[in-house]
Amino acid sequence: MTFPEALISGDLRAIRSFPKADLHNHCLLGGRRSVIEKYYGKKLEKFRATEPGIRELNRWIGKVYRPFIELPGAFEKGVEAAFVQAKHDGVATLEISIDACFGRMFNITPDRVVATLKYYHQAVAPGIDFRPELGFSRSQPFETLHSCFEDYLGFQYFRSIDLYDDEFAQSVGNFKPIYRLARQSGMKCKAHAGEFGTADSVMEAIEVLELDAVQHGIGAAGSSMVMKWLAGLQIPLNVCPTSNIRLKRISSYKTHPIRTLFDHGVNVTVNTDDALVFRDGNSEQYRKLYRCGLFTPDELDMIRKNGLEQ
């Protein structure tokens, strides 16, 4: 059976059997829910947004998820769950981020963070091409982020960085020194842009931070000029369709702008973002993108292979 045939059949087990990439995954929010809930001893309240934006997501994290992550050993269980989810979903290439300030917030040393990632990669999914990533909140002061970044530089372990959280919190220009340091350290540079912002915000982030890839980037679909520019540069947009719908940015799979981006030659990939929160792996998303008629099976196979080539 081929991947297009698996999509046509609708068999999730068959779809999961094909290798795919997940290049946009926030580790502690990307785990398999059953693993987390078994350790927690109770069900997590499901996330439901009532308005566009990430404010309600951050509220859910603080109210529902933080009590779990504060438990002894919960950090390790969260990392384990992320690898369990990736393996279950047939992920062959995995880029997952750990917030650079997470350790300080929960009194977890950088050594423990790195050791935990290394251990569960080998214990759960050693066959996955795992590319650890450091994440930075756009809502935090630059000085705090820079100090947290320095805690991890000596490990020479993390292979990329990402900037996320409230896209409108402060100018991307404030983070140029961090991205300069990351490039000097040989790290891939990524950032959230155009998740809720415009095509101009995508272009600005790429130009100012000299990005190698954009997380989301769907705002670029609002400008033919920006899409042509992106297609020429072939900078990947690591799109997360379910996330965009659950956060009320897009109304449905059928109207998702990933189709417009694809038609304009933009390099797009399909990714999970927060599988624990949004309840879809990549396999479910590929099936939904096919079932709603947005893509043909062969086009989705092309997107799948494109992700593996990044």
Image (cartoon, rainbow, N blue to C red):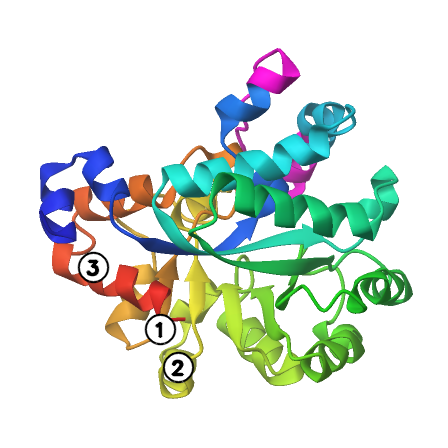
- Report which quarter residue 252 is drawn in: top left
Residue 283 is covered by the magenta coloring? no
| Distance from the alpha carbon under mark 1 to that under mark 2 | 6 Å
The location of residue 173, given as percent across then percent down, is 74, 78
Residue linked to disc 1: 267
Q: Secondary structure at mark 1?
A: loop
The location of residue 73, given as percent across then percent down, is 74, 28
Which residue type does callout 3 highlight? Asp
Which residue type does callout 1 highlight? Asn
Tell me, yes or no, if residue 44 can be seen here.
no
Magenta highlight range: 38-60
Residue linked to disc 3: 301
Sequence-first disc among 3 and 2: 2
> Does residue 271 appear left or right of residue 68 in this picture?
left
| Distance from the alpha carbon under mark 3 to that under mark 2 | 18 Å
Q: Nearer the viewer, mark 3 or mark 2?
A: 3
